[in-house]
Image (tube, helix red, strand yellow):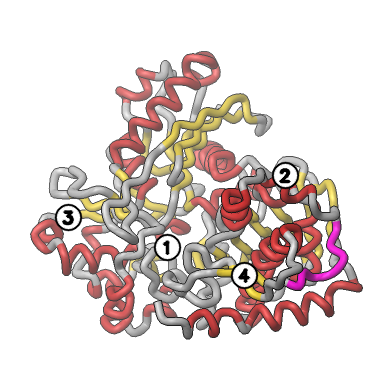
Amino acid sequence: MYIGIDLGTSGVKAVLVDAAQNVVASRTERLSVSRPHAGWSEQDPESWYEATLRALDALRADHPDAVSAVRGIGLSGQQHGAVLLDEAGGVLRPCILWNDTRAETECSLFEHRFPMCRQITGNIAMPGFTAPKILWVARHEPALFARTRHVVLPKAWLRFRMSGALIEDMSDASGSLWLDTGRRLWSDAALEATGLRLASMPRLVEGTDPAGHLSAELAARWGMKTPPVFAGGAGDNAAGAVGLGAIRTGDAFLSLGTSGVIWVTTDRFHPGGQHAIHAFCHAVPGQWHQMGVTLSAAASLAWWSRVTGLDEKSLLDELPDRPEKPSPVLFAPYLSGERTPHNDGTIRGGFVGLTQDTTRAEMTQAVLEGVAFSFRDALEGLAASGTRVTEADVIGGGSRAPLWTAILASVLNVTLHRLAHGEQGGAFGAARLARLAVTGEPVETVCTPPERVAAIAPDPGLIAPYGQAYARYRALYPALRSIPS
């Protein structure tokens, strides 16, 4: 038996997985986010630990024999968060989360101090990454920064709290801007640019490697025969890829969740150029990945639902199952800024092309198409960096809407595959990593893909019309950017 723990922003999810890779049980405990100032987003790390205890306590109560037989634990985590520790390992301040935007100025400062940032890390400095956050602390909370001895990412802190081991995996470390991503080791120059040194950082391991043991106290609490091994684990997207079996070069998936992701597995370090494409290590040895991100995917439809007062199903029921033509209305889905390709946290969205005759259905379709166009922006960024996608699996809550996946296929001119069991998420991938850390099995033996149950091909009659609509959509960003805030 194996346990996977996914430390998300809104909750901690724990799954119990057997030797046949069946999810025996799962439990989610909610988390809250503190926003003391505009653009700030923080959490108390101790709340992660307490939520994890509650989740595993519940699994133990319902499945005592299975939990007692657990051999390994894998961790998946929200990326980029900054947890600062003092000499004794105590937390110095609330964790600054991935969606905190206070460090905009520090991004430029970091790249000025570390001119090789984009070549070595494979990424543009963004406020969401960890390194600019630490520069912000150094500039605005200098006394606290002076007491900082270690900086860890969220899941690494959770492992430390549960095992006493300061260890990080390659995929999560990639999102810090401190990793030499091609060489899979910490960059001294990147650390120096933020006033840190190698001794401040956790030991690096692959996601499939053993990475400490659960403390004897916690093992006894859950009736475990011997303290389970921790796996190195993974950042949340890499753990999701492991769960989907996206471990081979060229494997691609599109996640239509609250935010949106296009992922492509690569067999080498492949920096994304100037289009805000991320280049990270994979959680499995010898593999990397590229990733484009749109910040408001399914969140855009959820926003439109709140505005109209209708639930999402009712809005979609007003539309056909497949698109007949593009909506005459355009929607810019920049409700929370945009990541790929603009790297702009201040841009905001809107509708364009409204008339006296515009219907709610046309506006709903425009929302779906605007998100699809933002995915095409990411796809174009990947292509500009040399990575082309011709087919991809599609997951996430939005993938259950036939119209939306049909729109995406035609806008992207990519065949999309719906999966039989594509919603296991990062916790399931973490459990797979736990198994690999214990057994040493070949990665491809364990990380098999789920069954594909449907293929959604582009509509040949819509590829050109959507190409024309996308060209109009591309004009929205510079126009919105020119409007004074």
- Give the magenta-colored segment's residue range: 322-328
What amino acid type should be assigned to the residue bearing mark 1?
Gly
From the image, state whether disc 2 or disc 4 is nearer to you.
4
Residue 241 in view in this figure = no
- The residue indicated by pointer 1 is 175
Q: Secondary structure at mark 4?
A: strand
3 or 1: tag closer to the N-terminus: 3
- The residue indicated by pointer 3 is 149
What separation in Å lies between label 2 and label 1 (alpha carbons)? 36 Å
Give coordinates of residue 336: x percent, y percent: 48, 63
Residue occupying the point 72% across, 44% down:
313
What amino acid type should be assigned to the residue bearing mark 2?
Lys
What separation in Å lies between label 2 and label 4 (alpha carbons)? 21 Å
- The residue indicated by pointer 2 is 313
Q: Are marks 3 and 1 in contact (CB under 8 Å)?
A: no
Residue found farthest to the left = 143
What separation in Å lies between label 3 and label 4 (alpha carbons)? 48 Å
Q: Is residue 391 left or right of residue 430?
A: right
Q: Residues within 10 Å of mark 4 (few under 14, many from 20)?
A: some
Quarter holding the N terminus?
Answer: top right
Q: Which mark is residue 358?
A: none
